[in-house]
Amino acid sequence: MEFFELHPVTPQLRYINKAVEVLKNGGVIIYPTDTVYGIGCDIYNKEALDRVYQIKHEAGTKLFSFICPDLKDISKYAKVSDYAYKTMKKLLPGPYTFVLPAAKEVPKKLWSKRKTVGIRIPDHKIALLLAKELGNPIVSTSVTNRKGDVLFNPDEIKIIFNTQVDLMLASGALEGKPSSIIDLSKEKPKVLREGAGDISAFASY
């Protein structure tokens, strides 16, 4: 595994470009977000996606969310109501995963049984630059150990995943919680997981 330490605010573009090259070639990477470290690949590379499932010791039915660089092209990947768009515009970028009806552009492996997908736009320069430079969304699933505990320390992650992923972009220890998951696929929002981020706006539903 290649390992690079990046500045969280002004990340070195040469390392971003190396990671993008790995993603374009069907590789799997670890990268920082505004909550925890994520394991990711290009959502359109089936072999890479299968590798992520193996690394996570998950059955193919486990749902992974994915990162988009901004809301500009969101309608390519999900069906977004006016209410959902306004809600996301207020809270993103931020530590939220929004569940929305899937658009046909998204591989069905990432759809839930209800034909929804989870979308993230994290408030972290490195994650957003990766998705922007790749030109495709990136799978986002928390880096965990075999027990399912989230790992925050890049040195520990490096030791455990050294032979499992192709490249890691580190940006210090991340002590956040996983993202809050908000379902916006129906008329009323529903909090599916309370994690990082203020969810008081949804308390009245």
Image (spheres, helix red, strand yellow):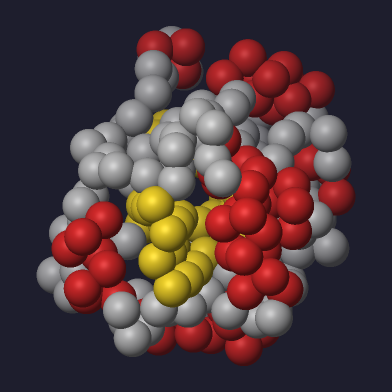
Q: Give the mark count.
A: 0
Q: Nearer the viewer, residue 82 or 32?
A: 32
- 109 displayed left or right of 39: right
Q: Quadrant of residue 159?
A: bottom left
Q: Is residue 105 above or below residue 184?
A: below
Q: Nearer the viewer, residue 195 or 135?
A: 135
- 195 displayed left or right of 60: left
- The picture places residue 56, in percent across and down from the top left corner, at 35, 75
Task: Please name the residue shown 62% across and 65% down the image.
Answer: 18
- 103 displayed left or right of 95: right
- The picture places residue 74, in percent across and down from the top left corner, at 79, 41
Task: Please name the residue shown 63% across and 14% down the image.
Answer: 90
- 108 displayed left or right of 62: right
Q: Is residue 55 above or below residue 143?
A: below
Q: Quadrant of residue 12?
A: top right
Q: Nearer the viewer, residue 3 or 194?
A: 3
Which quadrant: the N terminus?
bottom left
The reply to whether residue 192 is visible in this rendering is no
The reply to whether residue 74 is visible in this rendering is yes
Task: Please name the residue shown 63% across and 48% down the image.
Answer: 13
- The picture places residue 21, in percent across and down from the top left corner, at 68, 70
Q: Quadrant of residue 116?
A: bottom right
Q: Is residue 141 above or below residue 162?
A: above
- The picture places residue 72, in percent across and down from the top left corner, at 83, 34
